[in-house]
Image (spheres, helix red, strand yellow):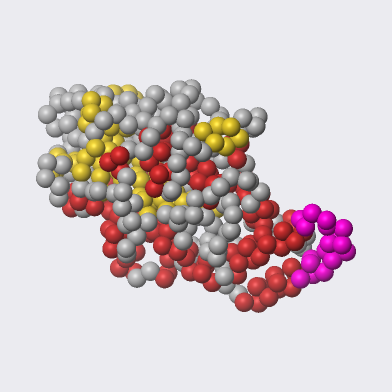
Amino acid sequence: MRLGLTGFASLSWPNLMQLRAASPLPSSQEKTAVIMVWLPGGCSHLDSYDPKPEIGSEYRGPFKTIDTKVPGLQFTELLPLHAQLADKFTILRSMSHRGPGHPAGSMQMLSGDTDERDKAKPKLPDWMSVVNYLRSQGPQGTNPLPRYVGVNPPLEYNGPAYLGDAYSPFSVQDDPNRPNFEVPNIGLANPAEAIRLSDRVALRQSIDNLERSFDREGELGALDQFETQAMTLLTNPQTRKAFDLSQEDPRVRDRYGRNRWGQQLLLARRLAEAGAEIITSSLNGPLCGRVSNWDDHAVNHHVFDALRFRAAAYDQAVTALIEDVYARGLDKRVLVVVTGEFGRTPKIEYDRSTGAGNASAAAGTVQPGRDHWPRAFSNLWAGGGITTGRVIGATDKRGEDVIERVCSPGDFLATIYHHLGIDGSKVLINDFNGRPTPIVDQGKPIAELIA
Protein backbone atom coordinates (compact mmCIF):
# COMPACT_ATOMS: atom_id res chain seq x y z
CA MET A 1 0.00 0.00 0.00
CA ARG A 2 1.24 3.47 -0.81
CA LEU A 3 -0.23 6.78 0.36
CA GLY A 4 0.90 9.69 -1.75
CA LEU A 5 -0.08 13.07 -3.17
CA THR A 6 -1.48 11.35 -6.24
CA GLY A 7 -4.47 10.26 -4.18
CA PHE A 8 -6.18 6.95 -3.63
CA ALA A 9 -6.76 6.32 -7.34
CA SER A 10 -3.12 5.24 -7.55
CA LEU A 11 -3.08 3.10 -4.40
CA SER A 12 -2.31 -0.56 -4.86
CA TRP A 13 -4.70 -1.77 -2.13
CA PRO A 14 -7.95 -0.28 -3.52
CA ASN A 15 -6.94 -1.38 -6.99
CA LEU A 16 -6.34 -4.89 -5.71
CA MET A 17 -9.78 -4.89 -4.10
CA GLN A 18 -11.30 -3.77 -7.38
CA LEU A 19 -9.55 -6.60 -9.21
CA ARG A 20 -10.73 -9.10 -6.63
CA ALA A 21 -14.38 -8.15 -7.06
CA ALA A 22 -14.23 -8.45 -10.84
CA SER A 23 -14.36 -12.24 -11.09
CA PRO A 24 -17.72 -13.93 -11.72
CA LEU A 25 -16.88 -17.06 -9.73
CA PRO A 26 -19.13 -17.90 -6.78
CA SER A 27 -17.73 -17.67 -3.29
CA SER A 28 -18.05 -19.85 -0.25
CA GLN A 29 -19.72 -17.89 2.52
CA GLU A 30 -18.31 -20.10 5.25
CA LYS A 31 -16.01 -18.14 7.48
CA THR A 32 -13.90 -21.08 8.42
CA ALA A 33 -10.16 -20.39 8.50
CA VAL A 34 -6.82 -22.18 8.10
CA ILE A 35 -3.49 -21.51 9.76
CA MET A 36 -0.70 -23.26 7.88
CA VAL A 37 2.69 -23.53 9.57
CA TRP A 38 5.30 -24.16 6.89
CA LEU A 39 8.66 -25.88 7.52
CA PRO A 40 10.74 -24.86 4.47
CA GLY A 41 13.27 -27.48 3.50
CA GLY A 42 11.39 -30.40 5.00
CA CYS A 43 11.44 -31.85 8.51
CA SER A 44 12.91 -35.30 9.15
CA HIS A 45 9.93 -37.53 9.88
CA LEU A 46 12.12 -40.20 11.51
CA ASP A 47 13.45 -37.68 14.03
CA SER A 48 10.07 -36.18 14.92
CA TYR A 49 6.63 -37.72 14.33
CA ASP A 50 7.50 -41.14 12.87
CA PRO A 51 10.44 -42.58 14.82
CA LYS A 52 11.82 -46.02 14.03
CA PRO A 53 13.66 -47.08 17.21
CA GLU A 54 14.23 -50.66 16.08
CA ILE A 55 16.16 -49.96 12.86
CA GLY A 56 19.92 -49.97 12.47
CA SER A 57 22.27 -47.11 13.28
CA GLU A 58 22.71 -46.22 9.60
CA TYR A 59 19.07 -45.05 9.69
CA ARG A 60 18.19 -44.37 13.31
CA GLY A 61 19.15 -41.01 14.72
CA PRO A 62 20.48 -40.48 18.26
CA PHE A 63 17.15 -39.47 19.77
CA LYS A 64 15.18 -41.60 22.18
CA THR A 65 11.49 -42.25 21.66
CA ILE A 66 8.96 -41.06 24.22
CA ASP A 67 5.38 -42.04 24.92
CA THR A 68 2.64 -39.51 24.32
CA LYS A 69 -0.77 -38.87 25.84
CA VAL A 70 -2.22 -41.16 23.18
CA PRO A 71 -1.60 -44.85 24.02
CA GLY A 72 0.71 -46.49 21.49
CA LEU A 73 1.76 -43.22 19.85
CA GLN A 74 5.41 -42.25 20.21
CA PHE A 75 7.48 -39.26 19.11
CA THR A 76 11.17 -38.54 19.61
CA GLU A 77 12.43 -36.88 22.74
CA LEU A 78 12.73 -33.60 20.80
CA LEU A 79 8.96 -33.06 21.16
CA PRO A 80 8.00 -33.40 24.84
CA LEU A 81 5.29 -30.72 24.67
CA HIS A 82 3.78 -32.36 21.59
CA ALA A 83 3.74 -35.63 23.54
CA GLN A 84 1.75 -34.04 26.36
CA LEU A 85 -0.76 -32.55 23.88
CA ALA A 86 -1.07 -35.48 21.46
CA ASP A 87 -4.80 -35.87 22.14
CA LYS A 88 -5.39 -32.46 20.55
CA PHE A 89 -4.03 -33.22 17.08
CA THR A 90 -3.74 -35.98 14.49
CA ILE A 91 -0.53 -37.05 12.77
CA LEU A 92 -0.67 -38.08 9.12
CA ARG A 93 2.34 -40.35 8.52
CA SER A 94 1.60 -41.27 4.92
CA MET A 95 2.12 -38.20 2.73
CA SER A 96 3.89 -39.03 -0.52
CA HIS A 97 4.68 -37.35 -3.84
CA ARG A 98 7.30 -37.29 -6.58
CA GLY A 99 8.71 -33.78 -6.38
CA PRO A 100 12.38 -34.23 -5.40
CA GLY A 101 13.48 -30.57 -5.35
CA HIS A 102 12.35 -27.71 -3.13
CA PRO A 103 10.50 -25.88 -5.94
CA ALA A 104 8.77 -29.01 -7.24
CA GLY A 105 8.00 -30.29 -3.76
CA SER A 106 6.56 -26.96 -2.64
CA MET A 107 4.47 -26.61 -5.80
CA GLN A 108 3.17 -30.15 -5.45
CA MET A 109 2.09 -29.59 -1.85
CA LEU A 110 0.70 -26.06 -2.14
CA SER A 111 -0.71 -25.93 -5.67
CA GLY A 112 -1.10 -29.56 -6.74
CA ASP A 113 1.31 -29.25 -9.66
CA THR A 114 2.34 -32.84 -10.42
CA ASP A 115 5.38 -31.83 -12.50
CA GLU A 116 8.49 -33.41 -10.98
CA ARG A 117 10.77 -30.74 -12.44
CA ASP A 118 11.85 -27.65 -10.56
CA LYS A 119 10.53 -24.46 -12.15
CA ALA A 120 11.48 -20.83 -11.61
CA LYS A 121 7.83 -19.75 -11.32
CA PRO A 122 4.69 -21.63 -10.34
CA LYS A 123 2.41 -22.82 -13.12
CA LEU A 124 -0.61 -23.10 -10.81
CA PRO A 125 -1.79 -20.80 -8.03
CA ASP A 126 -1.25 -22.02 -4.48
CA TRP A 127 -4.28 -22.95 -2.41
CA MET A 128 -4.02 -19.78 -0.32
CA SER A 129 -4.37 -17.53 -3.39
CA VAL A 130 -7.17 -19.71 -4.76
CA VAL A 131 -9.18 -19.38 -1.55
CA ASN A 132 -8.54 -15.65 -1.46
CA TYR A 133 -9.80 -15.42 -5.03
CA LEU A 134 -12.91 -17.51 -4.47
CA ARG A 135 -13.89 -15.85 -1.22
CA SER A 136 -13.35 -12.37 -2.61
CA GLN A 137 -16.45 -12.63 -4.80
CA GLY A 138 -19.69 -11.00 -3.75
CA PRO A 139 -20.26 -8.84 -0.64
CA GLN A 140 -17.06 -8.03 1.21
CA GLY A 141 -18.66 -8.00 4.66
CA THR A 142 -17.66 -5.74 7.53
CA ASN A 143 -14.35 -7.30 8.60
CA PRO A 144 -11.60 -4.72 7.93
CA LEU A 145 -8.79 -7.28 8.06
CA PRO A 146 -7.17 -8.66 4.90
CA ARG A 147 -8.60 -12.08 4.09
CA TYR A 148 -5.17 -13.64 3.46
CA VAL A 149 -2.28 -12.70 5.72
CA GLY A 150 1.22 -14.12 5.57
CA VAL A 151 3.22 -13.80 8.78
CA ASN A 152 6.57 -14.47 7.15
CA PRO A 153 4.72 -16.32 4.35
CA PRO A 154 6.13 -19.09 2.12
CA LEU A 155 6.61 -17.14 -1.11
CA GLU A 156 9.86 -18.51 -2.53
CA TYR A 157 8.35 -21.15 -4.83
CA ASN A 158 4.63 -20.35 -4.72
CA GLY A 159 2.18 -17.57 -5.48
CA PRO A 160 -1.02 -16.62 -7.29
CA ALA A 161 0.26 -17.54 -10.79
CA TYR A 162 -2.48 -16.77 -13.35
CA LEU A 163 -4.79 -15.32 -10.70
CA GLY A 164 -2.56 -12.25 -10.50
CA ASP A 165 -0.92 -10.37 -7.66
CA ALA A 166 -4.28 -9.14 -6.39
CA TYR A 167 -4.58 -12.45 -4.56
CA SER A 168 -1.17 -12.51 -2.91
CA PRO A 169 -1.04 -12.25 0.88
CA PHE A 170 -0.93 -9.14 2.96
CA SER A 171 2.63 -9.87 4.02
CA VAL A 172 4.13 -9.25 7.47
CA GLN A 173 7.89 -9.72 7.10
CA ASP A 174 9.17 -8.07 10.27
CA ASP A 175 10.06 -10.04 13.41
CA PRO A 176 7.05 -9.91 15.79
CA ASN A 177 9.40 -10.54 18.71
CA ARG A 178 11.13 -7.17 18.26
CA PRO A 179 10.19 -4.70 21.04
CA ASN A 180 9.26 -2.06 18.45
CA PHE A 181 7.47 -4.45 16.07
CA GLU A 182 4.75 -2.66 14.13
CA VAL A 183 2.93 -3.40 10.89
CA PRO A 184 2.98 -0.33 8.62
CA ASN A 185 -0.19 1.03 7.02
CA ILE A 186 -2.50 -0.81 9.41
CA GLY A 187 -4.78 1.20 11.67
CA LEU A 188 -3.26 4.68 11.75
CA ALA A 189 -2.28 5.39 15.35
CA ASN A 190 -2.52 9.17 15.12
CA PRO A 191 -6.11 10.47 14.69
CA ALA A 192 -4.74 13.56 12.95
CA GLU A 193 -3.27 11.33 10.24
CA ALA A 194 -6.69 9.81 9.63
CA ILE A 195 -8.22 13.28 9.31
CA ARG A 196 -5.58 14.39 6.82
CA LEU A 197 -6.11 11.18 4.89
CA SER A 198 -9.88 11.80 4.75
CA ASP A 199 -9.26 15.34 3.56
CA ARG A 200 -7.03 14.06 0.77
CA VAL A 201 -9.73 11.62 -0.34
CA ALA A 202 -12.33 14.39 -0.29
CA LEU A 203 -10.08 16.53 -2.48
CA ARG A 204 -9.66 13.71 -4.96
CA GLN A 205 -13.40 13.14 -5.05
CA SER A 206 -14.10 16.80 -5.78
CA ILE A 207 -11.66 16.68 -8.70
CA ASP A 208 -13.50 13.60 -9.98
CA ASN A 209 -16.87 15.37 -10.18
CA LEU A 210 -16.36 16.44 -13.79
CA GLU A 211 -15.22 12.96 -14.78
CA ARG A 212 -18.28 11.40 -13.17
CA SER A 213 -20.59 13.17 -15.56
CA PHE A 214 -19.04 11.04 -18.33
CA ASP A 215 -18.79 7.86 -16.25
CA ARG A 216 -21.54 5.88 -17.96
CA GLU A 217 -20.29 2.52 -16.65
CA GLY A 218 -20.20 3.70 -13.03
CA GLU A 219 -16.57 2.67 -12.64
CA LEU A 220 -15.67 5.65 -10.47
CA GLY A 221 -18.57 4.92 -8.19
CA ALA A 222 -17.34 1.38 -7.86
CA LEU A 223 -13.85 2.65 -7.06
CA ASP A 224 -15.36 4.54 -4.12
CA GLN A 225 -16.34 1.19 -2.59
CA PHE A 226 -12.78 -0.10 -2.78
CA GLU A 227 -11.37 3.15 -1.44
CA THR A 228 -13.76 2.90 1.49
CA GLN A 229 -12.48 -0.60 2.22
CA ALA A 230 -8.89 0.61 2.05
CA MET A 231 -9.72 3.52 4.34
CA THR A 232 -11.29 1.09 6.79
CA LEU A 233 -8.14 -1.03 6.77
CA LEU A 234 -6.08 2.04 7.54
CA THR A 235 -8.29 3.79 10.06
CA ASN A 236 -10.35 1.12 11.81
CA PRO A 237 -8.84 0.48 15.27
CA GLN A 238 -9.82 -3.19 14.99
CA THR A 239 -7.10 -3.73 12.39
CA ARG A 240 -4.38 -2.21 14.52
CA LYS A 241 -5.56 -4.15 17.56
CA ALA A 242 -5.43 -7.49 15.72
CA PHE A 243 -1.75 -6.98 14.85
CA ASP A 244 -0.81 -5.54 18.26
CA LEU A 245 0.91 -8.23 20.32
CA SER A 246 1.18 -5.88 23.29
CA GLN A 247 -2.53 -6.59 23.81
CA GLU A 248 -1.59 -10.11 24.94
CA ASP A 249 -0.91 -11.08 28.53
CA PRO A 250 2.89 -11.35 28.92
CA ARG A 251 2.38 -14.87 30.27
CA VAL A 252 0.74 -15.89 27.01
CA ARG A 253 3.62 -14.44 25.04
CA ASP A 254 6.02 -16.37 27.26
CA ARG A 255 4.07 -19.58 26.66
CA TYR A 256 4.52 -19.25 22.89
CA GLY A 257 8.19 -18.42 23.32
CA ARG A 258 9.87 -15.04 23.29
CA ASN A 259 11.39 -15.62 19.89
CA ARG A 260 10.39 -15.05 16.29
CA TRP A 261 8.61 -18.37 15.80
CA GLY A 262 6.61 -18.13 18.99
CA GLN A 263 5.45 -14.61 18.30
CA GLN A 264 4.68 -15.39 14.63
CA LEU A 265 2.29 -18.14 15.68
CA LEU A 266 0.76 -16.00 18.42
CA LEU A 267 0.10 -13.32 15.82
CA ALA A 268 -1.39 -15.98 13.52
CA ARG A 269 -3.81 -16.98 16.27
CA ARG A 270 -4.76 -13.35 16.92
CA LEU A 271 -5.45 -12.80 13.23
CA ALA A 272 -7.59 -15.93 12.92
CA GLU A 273 -9.52 -14.90 16.01
CA ALA A 274 -10.06 -11.41 14.58
CA GLY A 275 -11.45 -12.74 11.31
CA ALA A 276 -8.58 -13.35 8.88
CA GLU A 277 -9.36 -16.50 6.91
CA ILE A 278 -6.03 -17.68 5.49
CA ILE A 279 -2.90 -17.28 7.59
CA THR A 280 0.48 -18.76 6.68
CA SER A 281 3.70 -18.66 8.66
CA SER A 282 7.12 -20.04 7.73
CA LEU A 283 9.38 -21.20 10.53
CA ASN A 284 12.79 -20.38 9.12
CA GLY A 285 15.62 -17.94 9.78
CA PRO A 286 18.31 -18.04 12.48
CA LEU A 287 16.29 -20.34 14.75
CA CYS A 288 16.83 -23.08 12.14
CA GLY A 289 20.60 -22.99 12.25
CA ARG A 290 23.34 -21.85 9.89
CA VAL A 291 21.43 -21.98 6.58
CA SER A 292 18.14 -20.70 8.08
CA ASN A 293 15.89 -23.56 6.97
CA TRP A 294 15.13 -27.25 7.54
CA ASP A 295 17.24 -28.42 4.57
CA ASP A 296 19.52 -30.61 6.67
CA HIS A 297 22.00 -31.92 4.10
CA ALA A 298 25.37 -32.71 5.63
CA VAL A 299 26.93 -29.88 3.62
CA ASN A 300 24.50 -27.46 5.33
CA HIS A 301 24.04 -28.76 8.86
CA HIS A 302 24.90 -31.50 11.24
CA VAL A 303 21.36 -32.83 10.97
CA PHE A 304 21.04 -33.95 14.58
CA ASP A 305 22.62 -30.82 16.01
CA ALA A 306 20.28 -28.77 13.83
CA LEU A 307 17.21 -30.64 15.06
CA ARG A 308 18.32 -30.16 18.67
CA PHE A 309 19.05 -26.50 18.00
CA ARG A 310 15.54 -25.69 16.75
CA ALA A 311 13.47 -28.27 18.61
CA ALA A 312 12.61 -26.33 21.77
CA ALA A 313 11.35 -23.24 19.93
CA TYR A 314 9.40 -25.37 17.47
CA ASP A 315 7.89 -27.61 20.14
CA GLN A 316 6.84 -24.65 22.26
CA ALA A 317 5.38 -22.46 19.52
CA VAL A 318 3.35 -25.13 17.74
CA THR A 319 1.86 -26.62 20.89
CA ALA A 320 0.98 -23.19 22.30
CA LEU A 321 -0.92 -22.43 19.08
CA ILE A 322 -2.81 -25.72 19.25
CA GLU A 323 -3.59 -25.22 22.94
CA ASP A 324 -5.01 -21.78 22.25
CA VAL A 325 -7.12 -22.92 19.31
CA TYR A 326 -8.96 -25.27 21.67
CA ALA A 327 -8.90 -23.10 24.80
CA ARG A 328 -10.34 -20.10 22.97
CA GLY A 329 -13.12 -22.01 21.22
CA LEU A 330 -11.62 -21.79 17.74
CA ASP A 331 -11.25 -25.52 17.21
CA LYS A 332 -14.30 -25.96 14.96
CA ARG A 333 -13.73 -22.91 12.76
CA VAL A 334 -9.92 -22.86 12.53
CA LEU A 335 -7.90 -25.71 11.03
CA VAL A 336 -4.17 -25.83 11.85
CA VAL A 337 -1.84 -27.65 9.45
CA VAL A 338 1.90 -28.08 10.04
CA THR A 339 3.97 -29.40 7.14
CA GLY A 340 6.96 -28.95 4.89
CA GLU A 341 7.39 -29.86 1.25
CA PHE A 342 8.79 -33.34 2.02
CA GLY A 343 10.68 -35.39 4.60
CA ARG A 344 14.35 -36.31 4.82
CA THR A 345 16.17 -39.49 3.75
CA PRO A 346 15.78 -42.30 6.26
CA LYS A 347 19.35 -43.39 5.58
CA ILE A 348 21.85 -41.01 7.13
CA GLU A 349 24.30 -39.46 4.66
CA TYR A 350 27.74 -38.01 5.40
CA ASP A 351 29.55 -35.16 3.71
CA ARG A 352 31.91 -32.29 4.45
CA SER A 353 30.48 -29.15 5.96
CA THR A 354 30.63 -26.06 3.77
CA GLY A 355 30.90 -23.68 6.72
CA ALA A 356 30.80 -23.28 10.47
CA GLY A 357 27.80 -21.87 12.28
CA ASN A 358 24.90 -22.86 14.46
CA ALA A 359 24.39 -26.62 14.01
CA SER A 360 27.29 -26.96 11.55
CA ALA A 361 30.91 -27.81 12.17
CA ALA A 362 33.82 -25.98 10.56
CA ALA A 363 34.16 -26.16 6.79
CA GLY A 364 35.61 -29.49 5.70
CA THR A 365 34.41 -31.40 8.75
CA VAL A 366 32.59 -34.63 7.88
CA GLN A 367 29.16 -34.57 9.49
CA PRO A 368 25.81 -36.42 9.19
CA GLY A 369 22.86 -35.16 7.18
CA ARG A 370 19.60 -36.27 5.64
CA ASP A 371 18.68 -35.41 2.05
CA HIS A 372 15.31 -34.76 0.32
CA TRP A 373 12.70 -37.52 0.68
CA PRO A 374 9.25 -36.99 -0.91
CA ARG A 375 8.32 -40.70 -0.93
CA ALA A 376 7.10 -40.67 2.68
CA PHE A 377 6.71 -37.97 5.30
CA SER A 378 4.46 -36.67 8.07
CA ASN A 379 2.33 -33.64 8.79
CA LEU A 380 0.17 -32.48 11.68
CA TRP A 381 -3.51 -31.50 11.72
CA ALA A 382 -5.46 -29.87 14.57
CA GLY A 383 -8.72 -28.00 15.06
CA GLY A 384 -11.16 -27.87 12.16
CA GLY A 385 -13.62 -30.05 14.07
CA ILE A 386 -11.58 -33.16 13.20
CA THR A 387 -11.19 -36.23 15.40
CA THR A 388 -7.84 -35.91 17.16
CA GLY A 389 -5.54 -38.12 19.19
CA ARG A 390 -4.89 -40.52 16.33
CA VAL A 391 -2.45 -41.52 13.59
CA ILE A 392 -3.36 -41.85 9.92
CA GLY A 393 -1.30 -44.13 7.69
CA ALA A 394 2.05 -45.79 8.22
CA THR A 395 5.47 -46.14 6.66
CA ASP A 396 7.62 -49.24 6.40
CA LYS A 397 10.13 -50.30 9.05
CA ARG A 398 12.74 -47.83 7.78
CA GLY A 399 10.39 -44.96 7.02
CA GLU A 400 11.22 -45.13 3.33
CA ASP A 401 7.83 -45.80 1.79
CA VAL A 402 4.17 -45.57 2.71
CA ILE A 403 2.60 -48.96 3.36
CA GLU A 404 -0.79 -47.84 4.66
CA ARG A 405 -3.22 -45.09 3.53
CA VAL A 406 -1.12 -43.30 0.88
CA CYS A 407 -2.08 -39.61 0.71
CA SER A 408 -1.11 -37.30 -2.14
CA PRO A 409 -0.78 -33.53 -2.39
CA GLY A 410 -4.14 -33.54 -4.17
CA ASP A 411 -5.68 -35.20 -1.10
CA PHE A 412 -3.92 -32.66 1.14
CA LEU A 413 -5.34 -29.76 -0.86
CA ALA A 414 -8.82 -31.23 -1.18
CA THR A 415 -8.94 -31.64 2.61
CA ILE A 416 -8.05 -28.00 3.21
CA TYR A 417 -10.56 -26.84 0.61
CA HIS A 418 -13.25 -29.02 2.17
CA HIS A 419 -12.76 -27.35 5.54
CA LEU A 420 -13.11 -23.98 3.81
CA GLY A 421 -16.39 -25.01 2.18
CA ILE A 422 -14.94 -25.47 -1.30
CA ASP A 423 -15.47 -28.60 -3.38
CA GLY A 424 -12.09 -28.90 -5.07
CA SER A 425 -13.43 -31.42 -7.59
CA LYS A 426 -15.90 -28.96 -9.07
CA VAL A 427 -14.17 -25.57 -9.12
CA LEU A 428 -12.44 -24.51 -12.34
CA ILE A 429 -10.50 -21.28 -12.87
CA ASN A 430 -9.37 -19.98 -16.26
CA ASP A 431 -5.60 -20.00 -16.69
CA PHE A 432 -3.49 -17.54 -18.73
CA ASN A 433 -4.83 -19.05 -21.95
CA GLY A 434 -8.45 -18.92 -20.84
CA ARG A 435 -8.53 -22.69 -20.34
CA PRO A 436 -10.66 -23.85 -17.38
CA THR A 437 -8.28 -25.45 -14.88
CA PRO A 438 -9.34 -27.50 -11.83
CA ILE A 439 -8.05 -26.34 -8.46
CA VAL A 440 -7.55 -30.02 -7.53
CA ASP A 441 -6.70 -32.14 -10.55
CA GLN A 442 -6.31 -35.39 -8.62
CA GLY A 443 -7.25 -36.12 -5.05
CA LYS A 444 -10.14 -36.10 -2.64
CA PRO A 445 -10.56 -35.04 1.00
CA ILE A 446 -8.91 -37.35 3.52
CA ALA A 447 -11.94 -38.88 5.23
CA GLU A 448 -10.21 -39.18 8.62
CA LEU A 449 -9.55 -35.42 8.57
CA ILE A 450 -13.09 -34.31 7.82
CA ALA A 451 -15.23 -33.04 10.66
Q: Residue 288: x and y, percent?
A: 36, 43
Residue range (magenta): 202-219
Q: Residue 438: x and y, percent?
A: 51, 33
Q: Residue at x 84, y 62 (%)?
A: 212
Q: Is residue 211 part of the magenta span, yes or no?
A: yes
Q: Image quadrant of residue 407?
A: top left
Rendered position, 31 above or below 239: above
Q: Residue 431: x and y, percent?
A: 61, 33
Observer able to see residue 47 = no
Observer able to see residue 51 = yes
Rendered position, 343 above or below 139: above
Q: Residue at x 29, y 59 (%)?
A: 326
Q: Along the horizontal axis of the image, is 236 left or right of 253?
A: right
Q: Residue at x 57, y 70 (%)?
A: 236
Q: In this orientation, which residue lies closer to the viewer: 171 or 396?
A: 396
Q: Residue at x 30, y 43 (%)?
A: 449
Q: Is residue 426 part of the magenta span, yes or no?
A: no
Please tell me whether the stretch drawn in magenta is mainly helix, strand or loop: helix
- Count of marks placed on residues: 0
In the rendered image, which quarter contains the N terminus? bottom right
Q: Image quadrant of residue 390?
A: top left
